[in-house]
Image: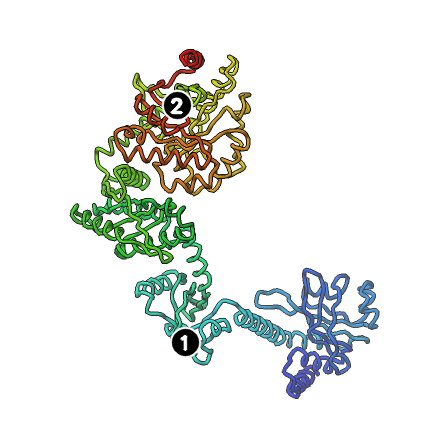
Amino acid sequence: MLARKIESIVAQLSDFKDTNFSQNICLALANAIDANLVFIANINYIEDTATTVACAQNNALQENFTYELANSPCEDLVNGGLCSHSDNIQQLYPKDQLLVDMGITGYIGIPLKNSANETPAILVALFKHTIEHPKAVESLFLLFSGLIEKDLEAQLFVKRLELSNHIINESKEAIVISNKHNQIIQVNKAFTDITGYSEAEVLGKDPGILGSEKNSALIYQEMWQELSQHGSWSGEVINQRKNGEEFPELLSINSIHDDQGNLTNYAAFFFDITARKKSEEKIFKQANFDLLTGLANRYFYMDKVAKNIAMAHLTDVPALVLTMDLDLFTEVNNLYGHDFGDELLKAVANRLQSLIANNDLAARTSGDGFALLINNLKHHDDINAFISKLHKAFNKPFYIQETSVYCTLSIGATLINNETETAQKVMKKAEYAMHHAKKGGRNSFEFFTDNLQSQVEQRLALKNDLQQALNNQALTVEFQPIIEVNNNKVTKFEALVRWQHKGQWISPAVFIPIAEEFGMIKPLGEFVLRTTCFQIKALNSQGFNDVIINVNRSVAEIPLNKKHNAQWLNTIRETGIKASSICFEITESSLATNNYNNEELLHYLQHAGCTIALDDFGTGYSSLSYLSRFPIDFLKIDQAFVKEMTSNKDQHTLVATIIVMAKALGKKVVAEGVETQAQLASLMALDCDFIQGYYYSKPLSGEQLAPFIRSFKQES
């Protein structure tokens, strides 16, 4: 009888045209064993449920369904082996509602194992009547379970393969599968989209058809060595699309082996990183190059200098560092406007770039500051020849906005050699040499020497001593009288800071620039202003209520942001004196800076009651433009003009012109450096308003001011 049932099942399976084995076996088994319901179900261990994948009832396929395993014979089946009950199944599992609803009496089930001896599925037959030959049914289940298990594993493999192929095809990453002979056997859609090749065009081809000549042979050598030794390689390469366009890609390759360790395939994955490269290039340029001129910025330049220093220590090959400032650029910028200035800076950059080799570097290191890093200049003759070429090039005019303008260079230079320590130190040397060149006159050059080194060391020592003097309040302030000519009266003084260092007086012309260079000018200026305010307060207490004291302010003290404009006034108010008791002296260089707050600051101070004096008038550039733009109350004629006005007709004419011009603009005039009766008489004849100089008095200490004012009144 069992043999006939087996033959019946086999014959029925042969007749089925549907290729779904699970459904066919359920139909054949249901018919052969006269079962009311036969199904194959997958087990969900997480949810503790079973879901049918094939279900046959009354010789017909049924819709699949899901049911709970708890309290059912299937639960025992999953956790054990063959489960067989010929009748009374409802009494054995009274909580299984499915058995009740279907009126089931007999039950036979068998677990379907996979290769890992797990039970992912079960085969079950349900009977509404007592099973007459349970052993025969059990034998059939045992016989056909192996076939069903293999079919389920095949279905699972196909699903996994389909899923893998779907993932491969939908991946945004290009995927190339090749055989062990490196012949392409499969590519995905991303590969086609990126390269322009269809799958048919590359099947059987070597992936090398994508390669670019820009990839070095060393890259491929390293790639195959890594694949051979470690089974994988990744890196950046340049590949070529079907249309010949080259593109950068991030490539990863893995070798695939079978269970015996034999190489079977290669799998390559790559991204087109063109957009990323462009973004990286943009970020790199923004971080390392000047946006206006396209030259390297200071950061990138310093990095290159540091690398050259490291190379010089290894190879003893020197390099030349040049720092440059454009002569009179600020004046040109103010005269023609900032757009003109920007065009000039770009023209300067282009000219510098045209003078250097491909392995050299040009940089813009500040507003009008540039630098060059020149290689292969081993001898002084080579250096001199290059400097000469540089000067010659910049002695030619620039043509900007149909205007011809000359803009020469002040140049400082030093060598990088095997004794050079850091990039910062070598730049300091070149910049110090440049500043020294600037002092000697425009369009000049200075090479850093041992003598300059000594000056630098002295300057640093003086800087440290000045800082200590500031901290210890070892500086003093003296006051030089300023005499009003019309009534021959002392109405003003100029506050002058003094420093006695190791028994010697250090000139302000020496230590003020040091204070500016090393960031000490603001506390120094604050000290002078506060000391002056307390001196005015002392004079006020003695009945001298109309005295005004001039306080010099450096360009480095002018706030960059208008929100800090009240700082100077706050000091005045804290000491309890009137703002009108202070006159701030500034130089033309303060007005010529690119700090757009300087004009607003002066208006703010003037509105509060302070007066403004323009010091050293006539030594700067385009002075008339400053007088028309800025709120100036007093012009101070530089002592260099006053000194020669009685012996030099041109100087006398210049002083007379300044006074007439000032009167026309409603400004008062102060003549500085008056030392002789002849100078005084000449200035009085020209209707100068105020006189300052040794003719009347040297600078006085604070204690001497009140007695001087009293005695001056008595003498007059």
Q: What residue type is labelled 2?
A: Leu
The answer to whether 450 appears left or right of 608 in the picture is left
- Identify the image quadrant of residue 473: top left
- Identify the image quadrant of residue 551: top left
- Name the disc covering residue 243, or none: 1
Circle nearer the viewer, 2 or 1: 2
The answer to whether 8 appears left or right of 88 in the picture is left
- Name the disc covering residue 117, or none: none
The Cα atoms of the two marked residues, 2 and 1, are separated by 77 Å
Labels 2 and 1: the sequence-earlier one = 1
Where does the image place residue 31, in percent across and percent down from the top left?
Answer: 73, 82
The reply to whether callout 2 and callout 1 are in contact (CB within 8 Å) is no
In the depicted structure, whether residue 124 falls above or below residue 703 = below
Task: Say which quadrant the N terminus sits in.
Answer: bottom right
Task: Say which quadrant the C terminus sits in.
Answer: top left
- Identify the image quadrant of residue 260: bottom left
Q: Which residue sits at x=24%, y=31%?
A: 454
Q: Is mark 1 on a helix, strand or loop?
A: loop
